[in-house]
Amino acid sequence: MIAYLECFVQENENDAESRPYDVVSGLRGALDLQGTIDCGDAAEQAAKDFGGMNSLAPLALVRPAGAADVASVVRAAANLNLTAAARGNGHSINGQAMADRGLVLDMPAMEDHFQVVRTSSTSGYADVSGGALWEDVLKRCVRDYGMAPRSWTDYLSLTVGGTLSNAGVSGQAFRYGPQTSNVTELEVVTGKGETFVCSEEENSELFFSVLGGLGQFGIITRARVRLQQAPDMVRWIRLVYTEFDAFTRDAESLVTRPHDDGESFDYVEGFAFMNSDNPADGLPSVPLHPDQVFDPTRLPQEAGSVLYCLELARHYRSSDHLSAVDKGVNRLLEGLGFVEGLEFQVDLGYEEFLLRVKQAEEHAKASGIWDAPHPWLNLFVSKSDIADFDRVVFKEILKDGIGGPMLVYPLLCSKWDARTSVVLPEGEIFYIVALLRFTPAYPKGPSCESLVAQNQEIVQYCRKKGLDFKLYLPHYRSQEEWKRHFGNQWSRFVERKTCFDPMAILAPGQKIFPRSNPKP
Ligand code: FAD
């Protein structure tokens, strides 16, 4: 049957768009899927991603029931000279989970797989499906087992396989590393349609290739995620700074404190904001509760137009006395150089803290800015260049703000495993910078093109000045640019591709390798 389809697709290569129903009905019969395969309107969701800046229609959308379906689809793509893309929750912004006239696998459709194993009273692991949403992993681990993964993203309607294919970074990463440092085993379907269990000990090259591998080497169908005991409560804190060097000094001191004795925060992030009344990125964006007000008279006279905020959290148990929590937090804040009188604190449940962006999502959906285009820019910038970056990017290029959060906080290279496919700047400390634009769609807001151009200006500046940086969630159009991105890791990346996906079937939306067909 596949042989018939092969001829059919080849003969109709230029005509595939006009005859997708024929190909798909043939595939449906040939693949013997436990799940489903659809084309046309039923596959429409796979032609869009977050913010709708790109649109590429697949030939078909497959809803796989399990790893066996994923493997059949990859093998069919190999035989039919098609591409195949795993789609997590489609929260990329540059078409990374799309497959132009290829096969898209809707990973959250996979049958539920969830098992928790305790290895001690305070640790264990969860085996979860590659298409599971992190928010569901959180709820099930905490509610049923009192356990939780150690490393998160800020927003949890993302899939396990999707974030592991990038890195998965939030305020816990300074301590535990990104999410890619917090999985011990994966089940992966490679670009050859073979299924392997892999870990540091078993099929280790595949394991490390896939982590941060931008979907290039295999499709993650199951992940074993490390768990620890979940706290009940979180003290969430924001501290304001007027000077970038005081902000970075304190942020770096907090992320490098030893934490074995419990004398450190459990979460450290930071952001830049405008000294303005703009609710999206000005002074009103800092308080943590509607009852709290940012009193601008507390700012020193010399405060400039860009200010900084350290965002911290400390876990505790509901049985702890609040006075003891206060005492512990005050001890940790001692010696920090924030502006007095501009500290904001709230106590909330652990789940509520981790799901904090969900609330923002609901507001953004109501105002229409969730679905507007999101020309975001995410970078890793070396500590050695972050002051220059601040001087030119935050204080000049972005002096009017971006209408959304501008995250900037330090991470430690030693918490990332160099064997994964992620590339980082040099040195132990580097900063993640995330410019998360939430602006109404043009004509009410600035045009998407102008914001993309501003992102390019920032990247050009970094490049021209020789700053040590890497794009996070990278997006390039030519292989030359990818080569530059991976630098001395490019040959390793190519070798991994040759080994695990030699026909370049997987994740074509990353635009790294063109589909090849080495068959005679
Ligand atoms: P998709 O966008 O669907 O896929 C991303 C890539 O991974 C594609 O190339 C796809 O083919 C591939 N892929 C998907 N599933 C699999 C799989 N099972 N196996 C192999 N490859 C796969 N990132 C952070 O690190 N920290 C954050 O705090 C953070 N916050 C975010 C907040 C919002 C509102 C949004 C929209 C994104 C955020 N991200 C964050 C970025 C996020 O990590 C990426 O969008 C990531 O791609 C995950 O999204 P997804 O699960 O929808 O994957």
Image (cartoon, helix red, strand yellow):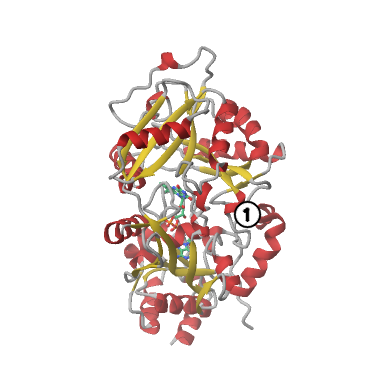
Position of residue 201 relative to residue 106, above or below, is below
Residue 263 placement (x, y as % from top left): 48, 41
Q: Viewer-proximal residue, 99 or 5?
A: 99
For ligand 1, the image quadrant comes to bottom left
Q: Residues within 10 Å of mark 1 (few under 14, many from 20)?
A: many
Amino acid under label 1? Answer: Val
Q: Quadrant of residue 126?
A: bottom left
Residue receiving disc 1: 423
* Number of disc labels: 1
Position of residue 95 relative to residue 448, above or below, is below
| 28 horizontally vs 74: left or right | left
- Considering the numbered disc 1 on the image, is that residue within a helix, a strand or a loop? loop
Image quarter hosting the N terminus:
bottom left
Q: CB of residue at label 1: within 8 Å of ligand 1?
A: no
At horizontal 45% and vertical 43% (from top left) the residue drawn is 267
Image quarter hosting the C terminus:
bottom right
At horizontal 49% and vertical 34% (from top left) the residue drawn is 271
Residue 423 placement (x, y as % from top left): 63, 54
Residue 234 placement (x, y as % from top left): 35, 42
Q: Quadrant of residue 228?
A: bottom left
At horizontal 40% and vertical 37% (from top left) the residue drawn is 441
Residue 314 placement (x, y as % from top left): 40, 41
